[in-house]
């Protein structure tokens, strides 16, 4: 699957950007929420997500790059989030919060920064619908993929398969036409694409190309 991130969209025409995502045949809409504390940038919050919710039929994949995400789960769910991912580095009781997200009726997700290894994540997987592997340091769009992190994707794929789980692996950061297939082949299920998607002259061709096995 492909999940374009509106972080790289035209903020003066977000409605048009959502239409562009749908017309391209993408699967989810990825929304990066940043608080200026957990990451050195500030984006948008529940009011913007709520305003956009009626403009698209696609699932809203909300990525919380914020401190104390547990305090905001219900509000983001009410604003229209279908899938909610928070960072393991941002809280102490990840298992509890993953369960709360599911209780709210959304798919639960945990994210790992590039320097965060997989130790300690195995016990979370049974209550985790997706794991988001960051292949750049979070906070800004348009960065280059950190190549060594691809090995983490393969290790996580083996961990999930060995447990017999259906947890999805989502990957975010520096993904484009050139490296997308390699990331899928490493074990990813969902690719977040920002700059590569919105700067491409033919986004539909891009989505078709990265989904087509080589």
Image: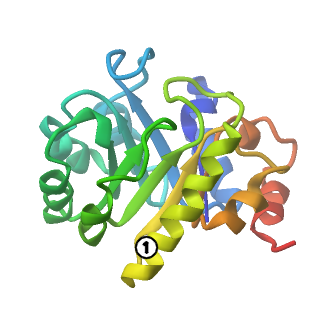
User: For the point 71% across and 68% down, which residue is it?
Assistant: 185
User: For the point 34% across and 55% down, which residue is it?
Assistant: 109
Dot 1 surroundings within 10 Å: few (below 14), some, or many (20 or more)? some
Q: Is there any visible trace of residue 165 in the rendered image?
A: no
Q: 140 left or right of 164? A: right
Question: Looking at the picture, how far across and down is residue 15, in whole percent?
Answer: 55, 39
59 and 57: which one is in front? 59
Q: 23 left or right of 31? A: right
On the image, numbered disc 1 is attached to which residue? 160
Quarter of the rendering containing residue 149 = top right
Q: 117 left or right of 67? A: right
Asked if 88 appears above or below 166 in the picture, the reply is: above
Q: 213 left or right of 5? A: right
Quarter of the rendering containing residue 183 = bottom right
Q: Is there any visible trace of residue 35 in the rendered image?
A: yes
- Can you say which quadrant of the picture contains the N terminus? bottom right
Question: Looking at the picture, how far across and down is residue 174, in whole percent?
Answer: 69, 38
Asked if 9 appears above or below 207 in the picture, the reply is: above
Asked if 214 appears above or below 109 in the picture, the reply is: below
Asked if 71 appears above or below 202 in the picture, the reply is: above
Number of marks in the image? 1
Question: Looking at the picture, how far across and down is residue 209, in whole percent?
Answer: 84, 63
Quarter of the rendering containing residue 196 = top right
User: Judging from the image, what secondary structure is the residue with disc 1 in?
Assistant: helix
User: For the point 50% across and 49% down, which residue is it?
Assistant: 133
């Amino acid at each position: 699957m492909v999940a374009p991130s509106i972080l790289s969209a035209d903020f003066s025409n977000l409605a048009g950007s959502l239409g562009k995502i749908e017309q391209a045949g993408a699967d989810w809409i990825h929304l990066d929420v940043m608080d200026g504390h957990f990451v050195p940038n500030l984006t948008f919050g529940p009011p913007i997500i709520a305003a956009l919710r009626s403009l698209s039929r696609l699932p809203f994949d909300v990525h919380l790059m914020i401190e104390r995400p547990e305090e905001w789960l219900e509000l983001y769910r009410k604003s229209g989030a279908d899938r909610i991912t928070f960072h393991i580095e941002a809280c102490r009781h990840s298992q509890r919060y993953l369960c709360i997200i599911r209780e709210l009726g959304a798919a639960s997700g945990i994210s790992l920064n590039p320097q965060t290894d997989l130790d300690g994540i195995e016990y979370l997987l049974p209550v985790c619908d997706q794991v988001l592997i960051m292949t750049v340091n979070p906070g800004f769009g348009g960065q280059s993929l950190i190549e060594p992190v691809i090995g983490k994707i393969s290790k996580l794929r083996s961990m999930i398969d060995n447990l017999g789980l259906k947890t999805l692996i989502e990957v975010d950061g520096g993904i484009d036409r050139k490296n997308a297939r390699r990331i899928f082949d490493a074990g990813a299920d969902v690719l977040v694409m920002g700059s590569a998607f919105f700067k491409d002259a033919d986004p539909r061709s891009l989505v078709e190309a990265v989904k087509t096995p080589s």
